[in-house]
Image (cartoon, helix red, strand yellow):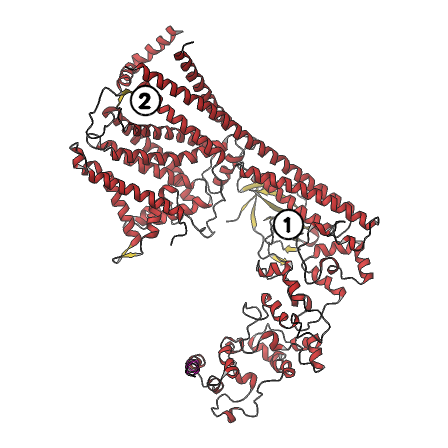
Amino acid sequence: MAHLLKDIWTYFDDRLRLSAGLEFGRKKKVPEHSYSFWYYFGGICLFLVGIQVLTGVLLLLYYTPSIDAAHESIVFIMSQVRFGWLIRSVHSWTANILIGAIFVHMFSSYFLKAYRPPRELTWVSGFLLLIIFLAFGFSGYLLPWNELSFFATKVGTDIAGVVPLVGKAVKAFILGGAQVSGATLSRFFWLHVAILPLLTLGVLGVHLLLVQILGMSTPIGLPASSARDVSFFPDFLIKDSLGWTLILVLIGVLCVFLPWEVGLKADPFAPTPLGIRPEWYFTFMFTTLKLIPSHILTLEGEVLAILAFLAGGLLWLTVPFLDRRAAREQRSRFFTVAGLVIVVYIVALTALTYLFPKLK
Amino acid sequence: MTRRRFIDVLLGGSLTATAIAFLYPVIRYLIPPRQQEAVMKKVVAAKIGELAPNSSKIFKFGSSPGLLINTQEGKLLAFSAICTHLACTVHYESDSDSIYCPCHGGRFDLAGNVIAGPPPAPLEAFKVEIAGDEIVVSAKS
Amino acid sequence: MKKLAALAFLTLVLAYFLFGQKNSCIECHQGLEKELQEPVKAVQTDVHIQFGLGCQDCHGGNSGQSDVELAKDKTFKGVPKRNQVPEFCGSCHSDSVYIKKYNPKLRVDQLRLYWTSQHGQLLKKGDLKGAVCTDCHGHHGIQPANRPKSMVFPWNIPQTCGRCHADPEYMKLYKIPTNQLSEYKQSVHAQALFEKKDLSAPVCNDCHGNHGASPPEVASVAFVCRQCHPTNGKLFSQSPHKNAFDELGLTECGACHGDHKILRPTDALLGVGKDSICIQCHDAGSKGYDVASQMSQKLTGFLARFQEAQALLSKAEQQGVEVTDPKFKLQDANTLLIQIRNLSHALSLQDFGEKIAEGGKVVAEVQKAGIAAMKEAKFRRTSLAIVTLILFLLAVALFAKIREMRKRQP
């Protein structure tokens, strides 16, 4: 038996140079220091993406992307398909957990200044992944075609339309027309199962490749490697698995006790329900727009806010090129404080949305 | 058994159990369920010849009842069977050529309009099409 | 004094812009006090003014004359006395040719009907306490009856009638009760009208008539009820109660359901319990008592099964299981429940039993689905427990492995 396995191994090794890969794996090390805990979050994101791909592919078997059948197919999955309720609830819950994990991963990398050279492109590709997964969330939310998703999409695309010059064109492209309709559902489905997965394949591939080539970044002031470093295989991976196991338990509990609701089928002619808002990860932007005064120095408040978000995004994307001190391996207090301000802003406005839903 | 071996066995065993616990639902999910398809908003209400003239049938349309009528002249009409007053199920009265709600005496004509009683709005009319030997009802919109 | 002058000035300005043309009635009266000034403001929203009529069209006189003596020329009618009001209003409203100019749809038989009413009869006898046109319609701010602000719009009618009929002091000399309004307000019809804003719900005039208002005769009340409750009426007419009630001179519907205080009927009304109506006539041991008892038992049994199935479904739903299909079936059962309750009017034990059996079948199916849903909910929780246990074991194994690997390192 052992002989047979060795033969199979040799066969593939000769043709795929597997030994080189194994050698690399053996050498891969993860630095050990007081902030090592944050290294887990990249792997958690990857694990959750895996769950999404698996459950997404399964849902694709029974889902129909047409306004006559989308909602009905979800009801069907939830009530007729064996374990359909589980697959669907896992997909919906994991989407939210994944976006939360992405934020944690992004901010922990930021505060540890992992973006400094030579890892600028890792940061840039990571930022693109953030946008891609927010787009996954936004497009996926419409697919069940229920009341909440219909109106959340309407509100979201209305905001996109406010951007000066390109807003109207962008909105029409996203919607596939003037308003949320069957064409929108087709488009969002196309984005969600084809375009975004393709983009993810490319960008995530680059992101992971860069991490393998460049290794893990260590905080400023600490050496790049030390005797305390652990090997990735099997030590760090086992610790990773422990985290993943606990997350699986969390997802299981959520799906059994808080299954994702089916909701009422969307009726485009019904008036917008009160208190409609997008998913939680967009609420900080949504509430900002609600609180902004309608005019600031003759400019429309909403437009100004959206431009501010776009500018903020651009700054965030180019942080590796702006943070000169970190590039010189020096403590950059300013960027740390700026980051804290942003975190507090996001947390505060998200909390505000839910604590005071009747604002304005 | 050494402590190390025990841990390895525990690890291997629980990994296998986890794999099975996750593969089982996925396989059951892939097996086709009893009901073939999701119920669509286009329903086969009946077959040609199933309904005699001047008779009717209640059929399931989505998750609510629908009323299929074959009039005296052989014309096929379909409506939502939910009375617009207090949501009782209406039925077709052949001797009066009207649709009647037994709860409070609401009455609709064969265009769905209210002709008597408390209902405040007409019955929702559906589109009827013949496909081969099937009578297909779908929502008008 | 200053305040009054300011008010008068404002009214002058307002009236000028409103009426444009010279109207000495308005100009003069807005400078007067209290009840002589009140018509000026009230009449601004009056339906007659909106049709282009003015003070002189009802009261006569010459509105072009500023001098008060000249204004009150020989056509001047002044304020009509109470017993003159019907003819006063009727002088236009009974003239079909005249009314057709303004609103061809408007009826012109109100005056004729009025004289047949109790109010009209009283007035003929010289009793001025009987209601006249202005008591119900108002005098200077009259609204069309189909506008919500009108004193005779459906949800204002109980109050309008009640102004006299619920006043014991006012009604002292008349031998009729004054509790109708308070009774009506407790009724299911009042609830439908005031809370659900259902304008098809009956108010005073639907049973008593408008202008020809008089208490409905015993035989005729039932016809009124049948207008909205035809099914129950038909079933009742087929039952042995119809002849019995007619012979006894009892109102068909009112004998059991009341006349003003018609409450939502409960299942306790049927049967032989202490709240039931049946035992008011049927003594223990009689056939009627027997039928009542059996019907009540069948109904309560069915209702219990229905509610059990309903509770099961909502519990399963709460636990996250999809139950839209069984809920759809339950809707059928609910319709059958309404029909069963209606059937109690027919008093046929056989028909009743058959319908209950039909309902029972549907409820049994729902119950089956509900039990299956609960089983599914339990399955989910049990599976979760098992899988969590497995994952917990895995976590422990991983943790132990980590510890062991750490120990192996120097």
Taking A143 as reference, is A162 above or below it? Answer: below
Disc 2 residue type?
Phe
Q: Is residue C304 magenta?
A: no
How far across and how far down the image is residue A108, in percent?
Answer: 28, 34
Looking at the image, residue C55 sits to the left or right of residue A170; the answer is right
Disc 1 residue type?
Val
How far across and how far down the image is residue A221, in percent?
Answer: 19, 29
Q: Nearer the viewer, mark 2 or mark 1?
A: 2
Q: Which quadrant of the rendered structure holds the C terminus of chain C? A: top left
Q: Circle 1 is placed at which residue position?
A: B90
Q: Is residue C3 magenta?
A: yes
Label 2: which secondary element: helix
Q: Which residues are magenta?
A: C2-12
Which numbered marker is on residue A236? 2
Looking at the image, residue A292 sits to the left or right of residue B120; the answer is left
Residue shown at the point (37%, 23%) measured from the top left? A241
Residue shown at the point (44%, 79%) measured from the top left? C18
